[in-house]
Amino acid sequence: MLTLSTLLVAQLVSFAVVWAVPSPAAPQMSLLDAVQVMAGRAATPLGLRRWSQASAPIGADNDWMSTVAAAQLRVPRERVRTVWQRTPDPAAVQVQVIKQGQLVQTGPEQRATVEQALLLPGLRWPAFELAVQQPGGRWSVVGANHSELLQWRRQVLLALLAGAVLLAPLVAWLALRLTRPLRRLADASADLSLQSNASLPLDGPREVQVLAAAMNAASERLRGQAHDVTRMLAAVAHDLRTPLTGLRLRADSAPPAQAARMVADIERMSAMIEQVLDYARGELEPPLLQPQDMVALLDDCIQSAHARGVDIRAALPDALIWRADALLLRRALDNLIDNAARYAGAVELRVERVGARLHVEVMDRGPGIAMADRQRLLQPFQRSEASRSRDTGGAGLGLAVAANAAQRHGGDLQLLGRDGGGLVARLALAS
């Protein structure tokens, strides 16, 4: 747009200059030619033109030229006017006749000499208009032909327009050569994430390549830092298991009322640590994708949910083979089923193949999730409510584990509203 705008402004300035600059002065004229055209000779070959108008030309009349023209045309002197086209001051152009080095006085006795001098064929005058009043009252006027000057201006404007038309494809090509790599860079950068190892394309102009290389380096550093943090988190969570085991043993020797509360807290902490470890494994361990019997895997998840006391119903096909990491996918489904059971009680499971993707949906009739919170809750350690109560407790990693599993399978986790109320958590897995 900047390049095209520059071209447009440059052409507009050129048009304005050509249009604003005054036209060149009209060509010089011969009084003899003007008289002959007025008498009936063709005007165009002499660079003149003839027209008719209602009133006499505006300007001071040149007496001697009008007198000579009237005598040649045999019309009364008062019906003839000769006016300079570009010089309103009659004194700006002086008519003097010099014969044999002597100035000829313009009196009646020298009329023949002056008339002879003014009608010399080679004598050229600045542009003037010779007008003769016709019997009907209109004036017949002979003057310089300016159409050639107007044609010159039109040709210059057409040349500028042709230049703009010829330059436009080149300018457009240069603009596209710069914007296409930037557009590809923007599209590729939109898919960058800490879980993705994709890099930005290094093509296009040198400046675009330098930008893409810098963004690739920054993305690689961020992935390395994120993995370091995840490893540290996994190490801390793993080390917490030992003191929790000791606390569990000591809780057995406590009074029954206190022991029950201590065991519940320990189990809650253990569940949170297990979620952290599941998230860390999903981040750090590469997925092992191989053909799986999805019906058997989903049925196993359902039986495990029943064992945990979850009210779950499922609609499964007879057979379905899909490339997947069974352990990673089971962690994701267990988290989605437990989340749905925690907020809604009953859970429904459905699986279907849609084109090149497999949709595994965990549905409930709970309060659902506001549209503004859906993307936020896919990030680690984010919860739909901030109370951190024991009833809805957790580390805020369940949806993040499921989203990570979907990404590792080339898909995504979609949180959708359900008709009639509730939530649909859809794992969309690529083939």
Image: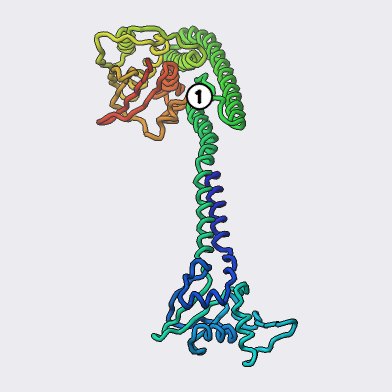
Query: What amino acid type should be assigned to the residue bearing mark 1?
Result: Ser
Residue closer to the observer: 198 or 13: 13
Quadrant of the image containing the C terminus: top left
User: Above or below — where is 124 with respect to 389?
Assistant: below
* Residue with the most extreme bottom position: 108
User: Left or right of 355: which side holds 187?
Assistant: right
Q: Position of residue 305 (x, y in %)?
A: 32, 13
Q: How many marks?
A: 1
Which residue position holds label 1? 193
User: Left or right of 14: which side holds 412?
Assistant: left
User: Above or below — where is 345 with respect to 26?
Assistant: above
Residue closer to the observer: 337 or 391: 337
User: Left or right of 130: which side holds 295?
Assistant: left
Q: Position of residue 310 (x, y in %)?
A: 31, 16
* Location of residue 33 by image quarter: bottom right
Q: Position of residue 377 (x, y in %)?
A: 43, 28
Residue drawn at 26 percent across, 30 percent down: 419
Residue closer to the observer: 424 or 155: 155
Q: Residues within 10 Å of mark 1 (few under 14, many from 20)?
A: few
* Location of residue 332 by image quarter: top left
The answer to whether residue 316 shows anywhere in this view is yes
Q: Position of residue 134 (x, y in %)?
A: 43, 84
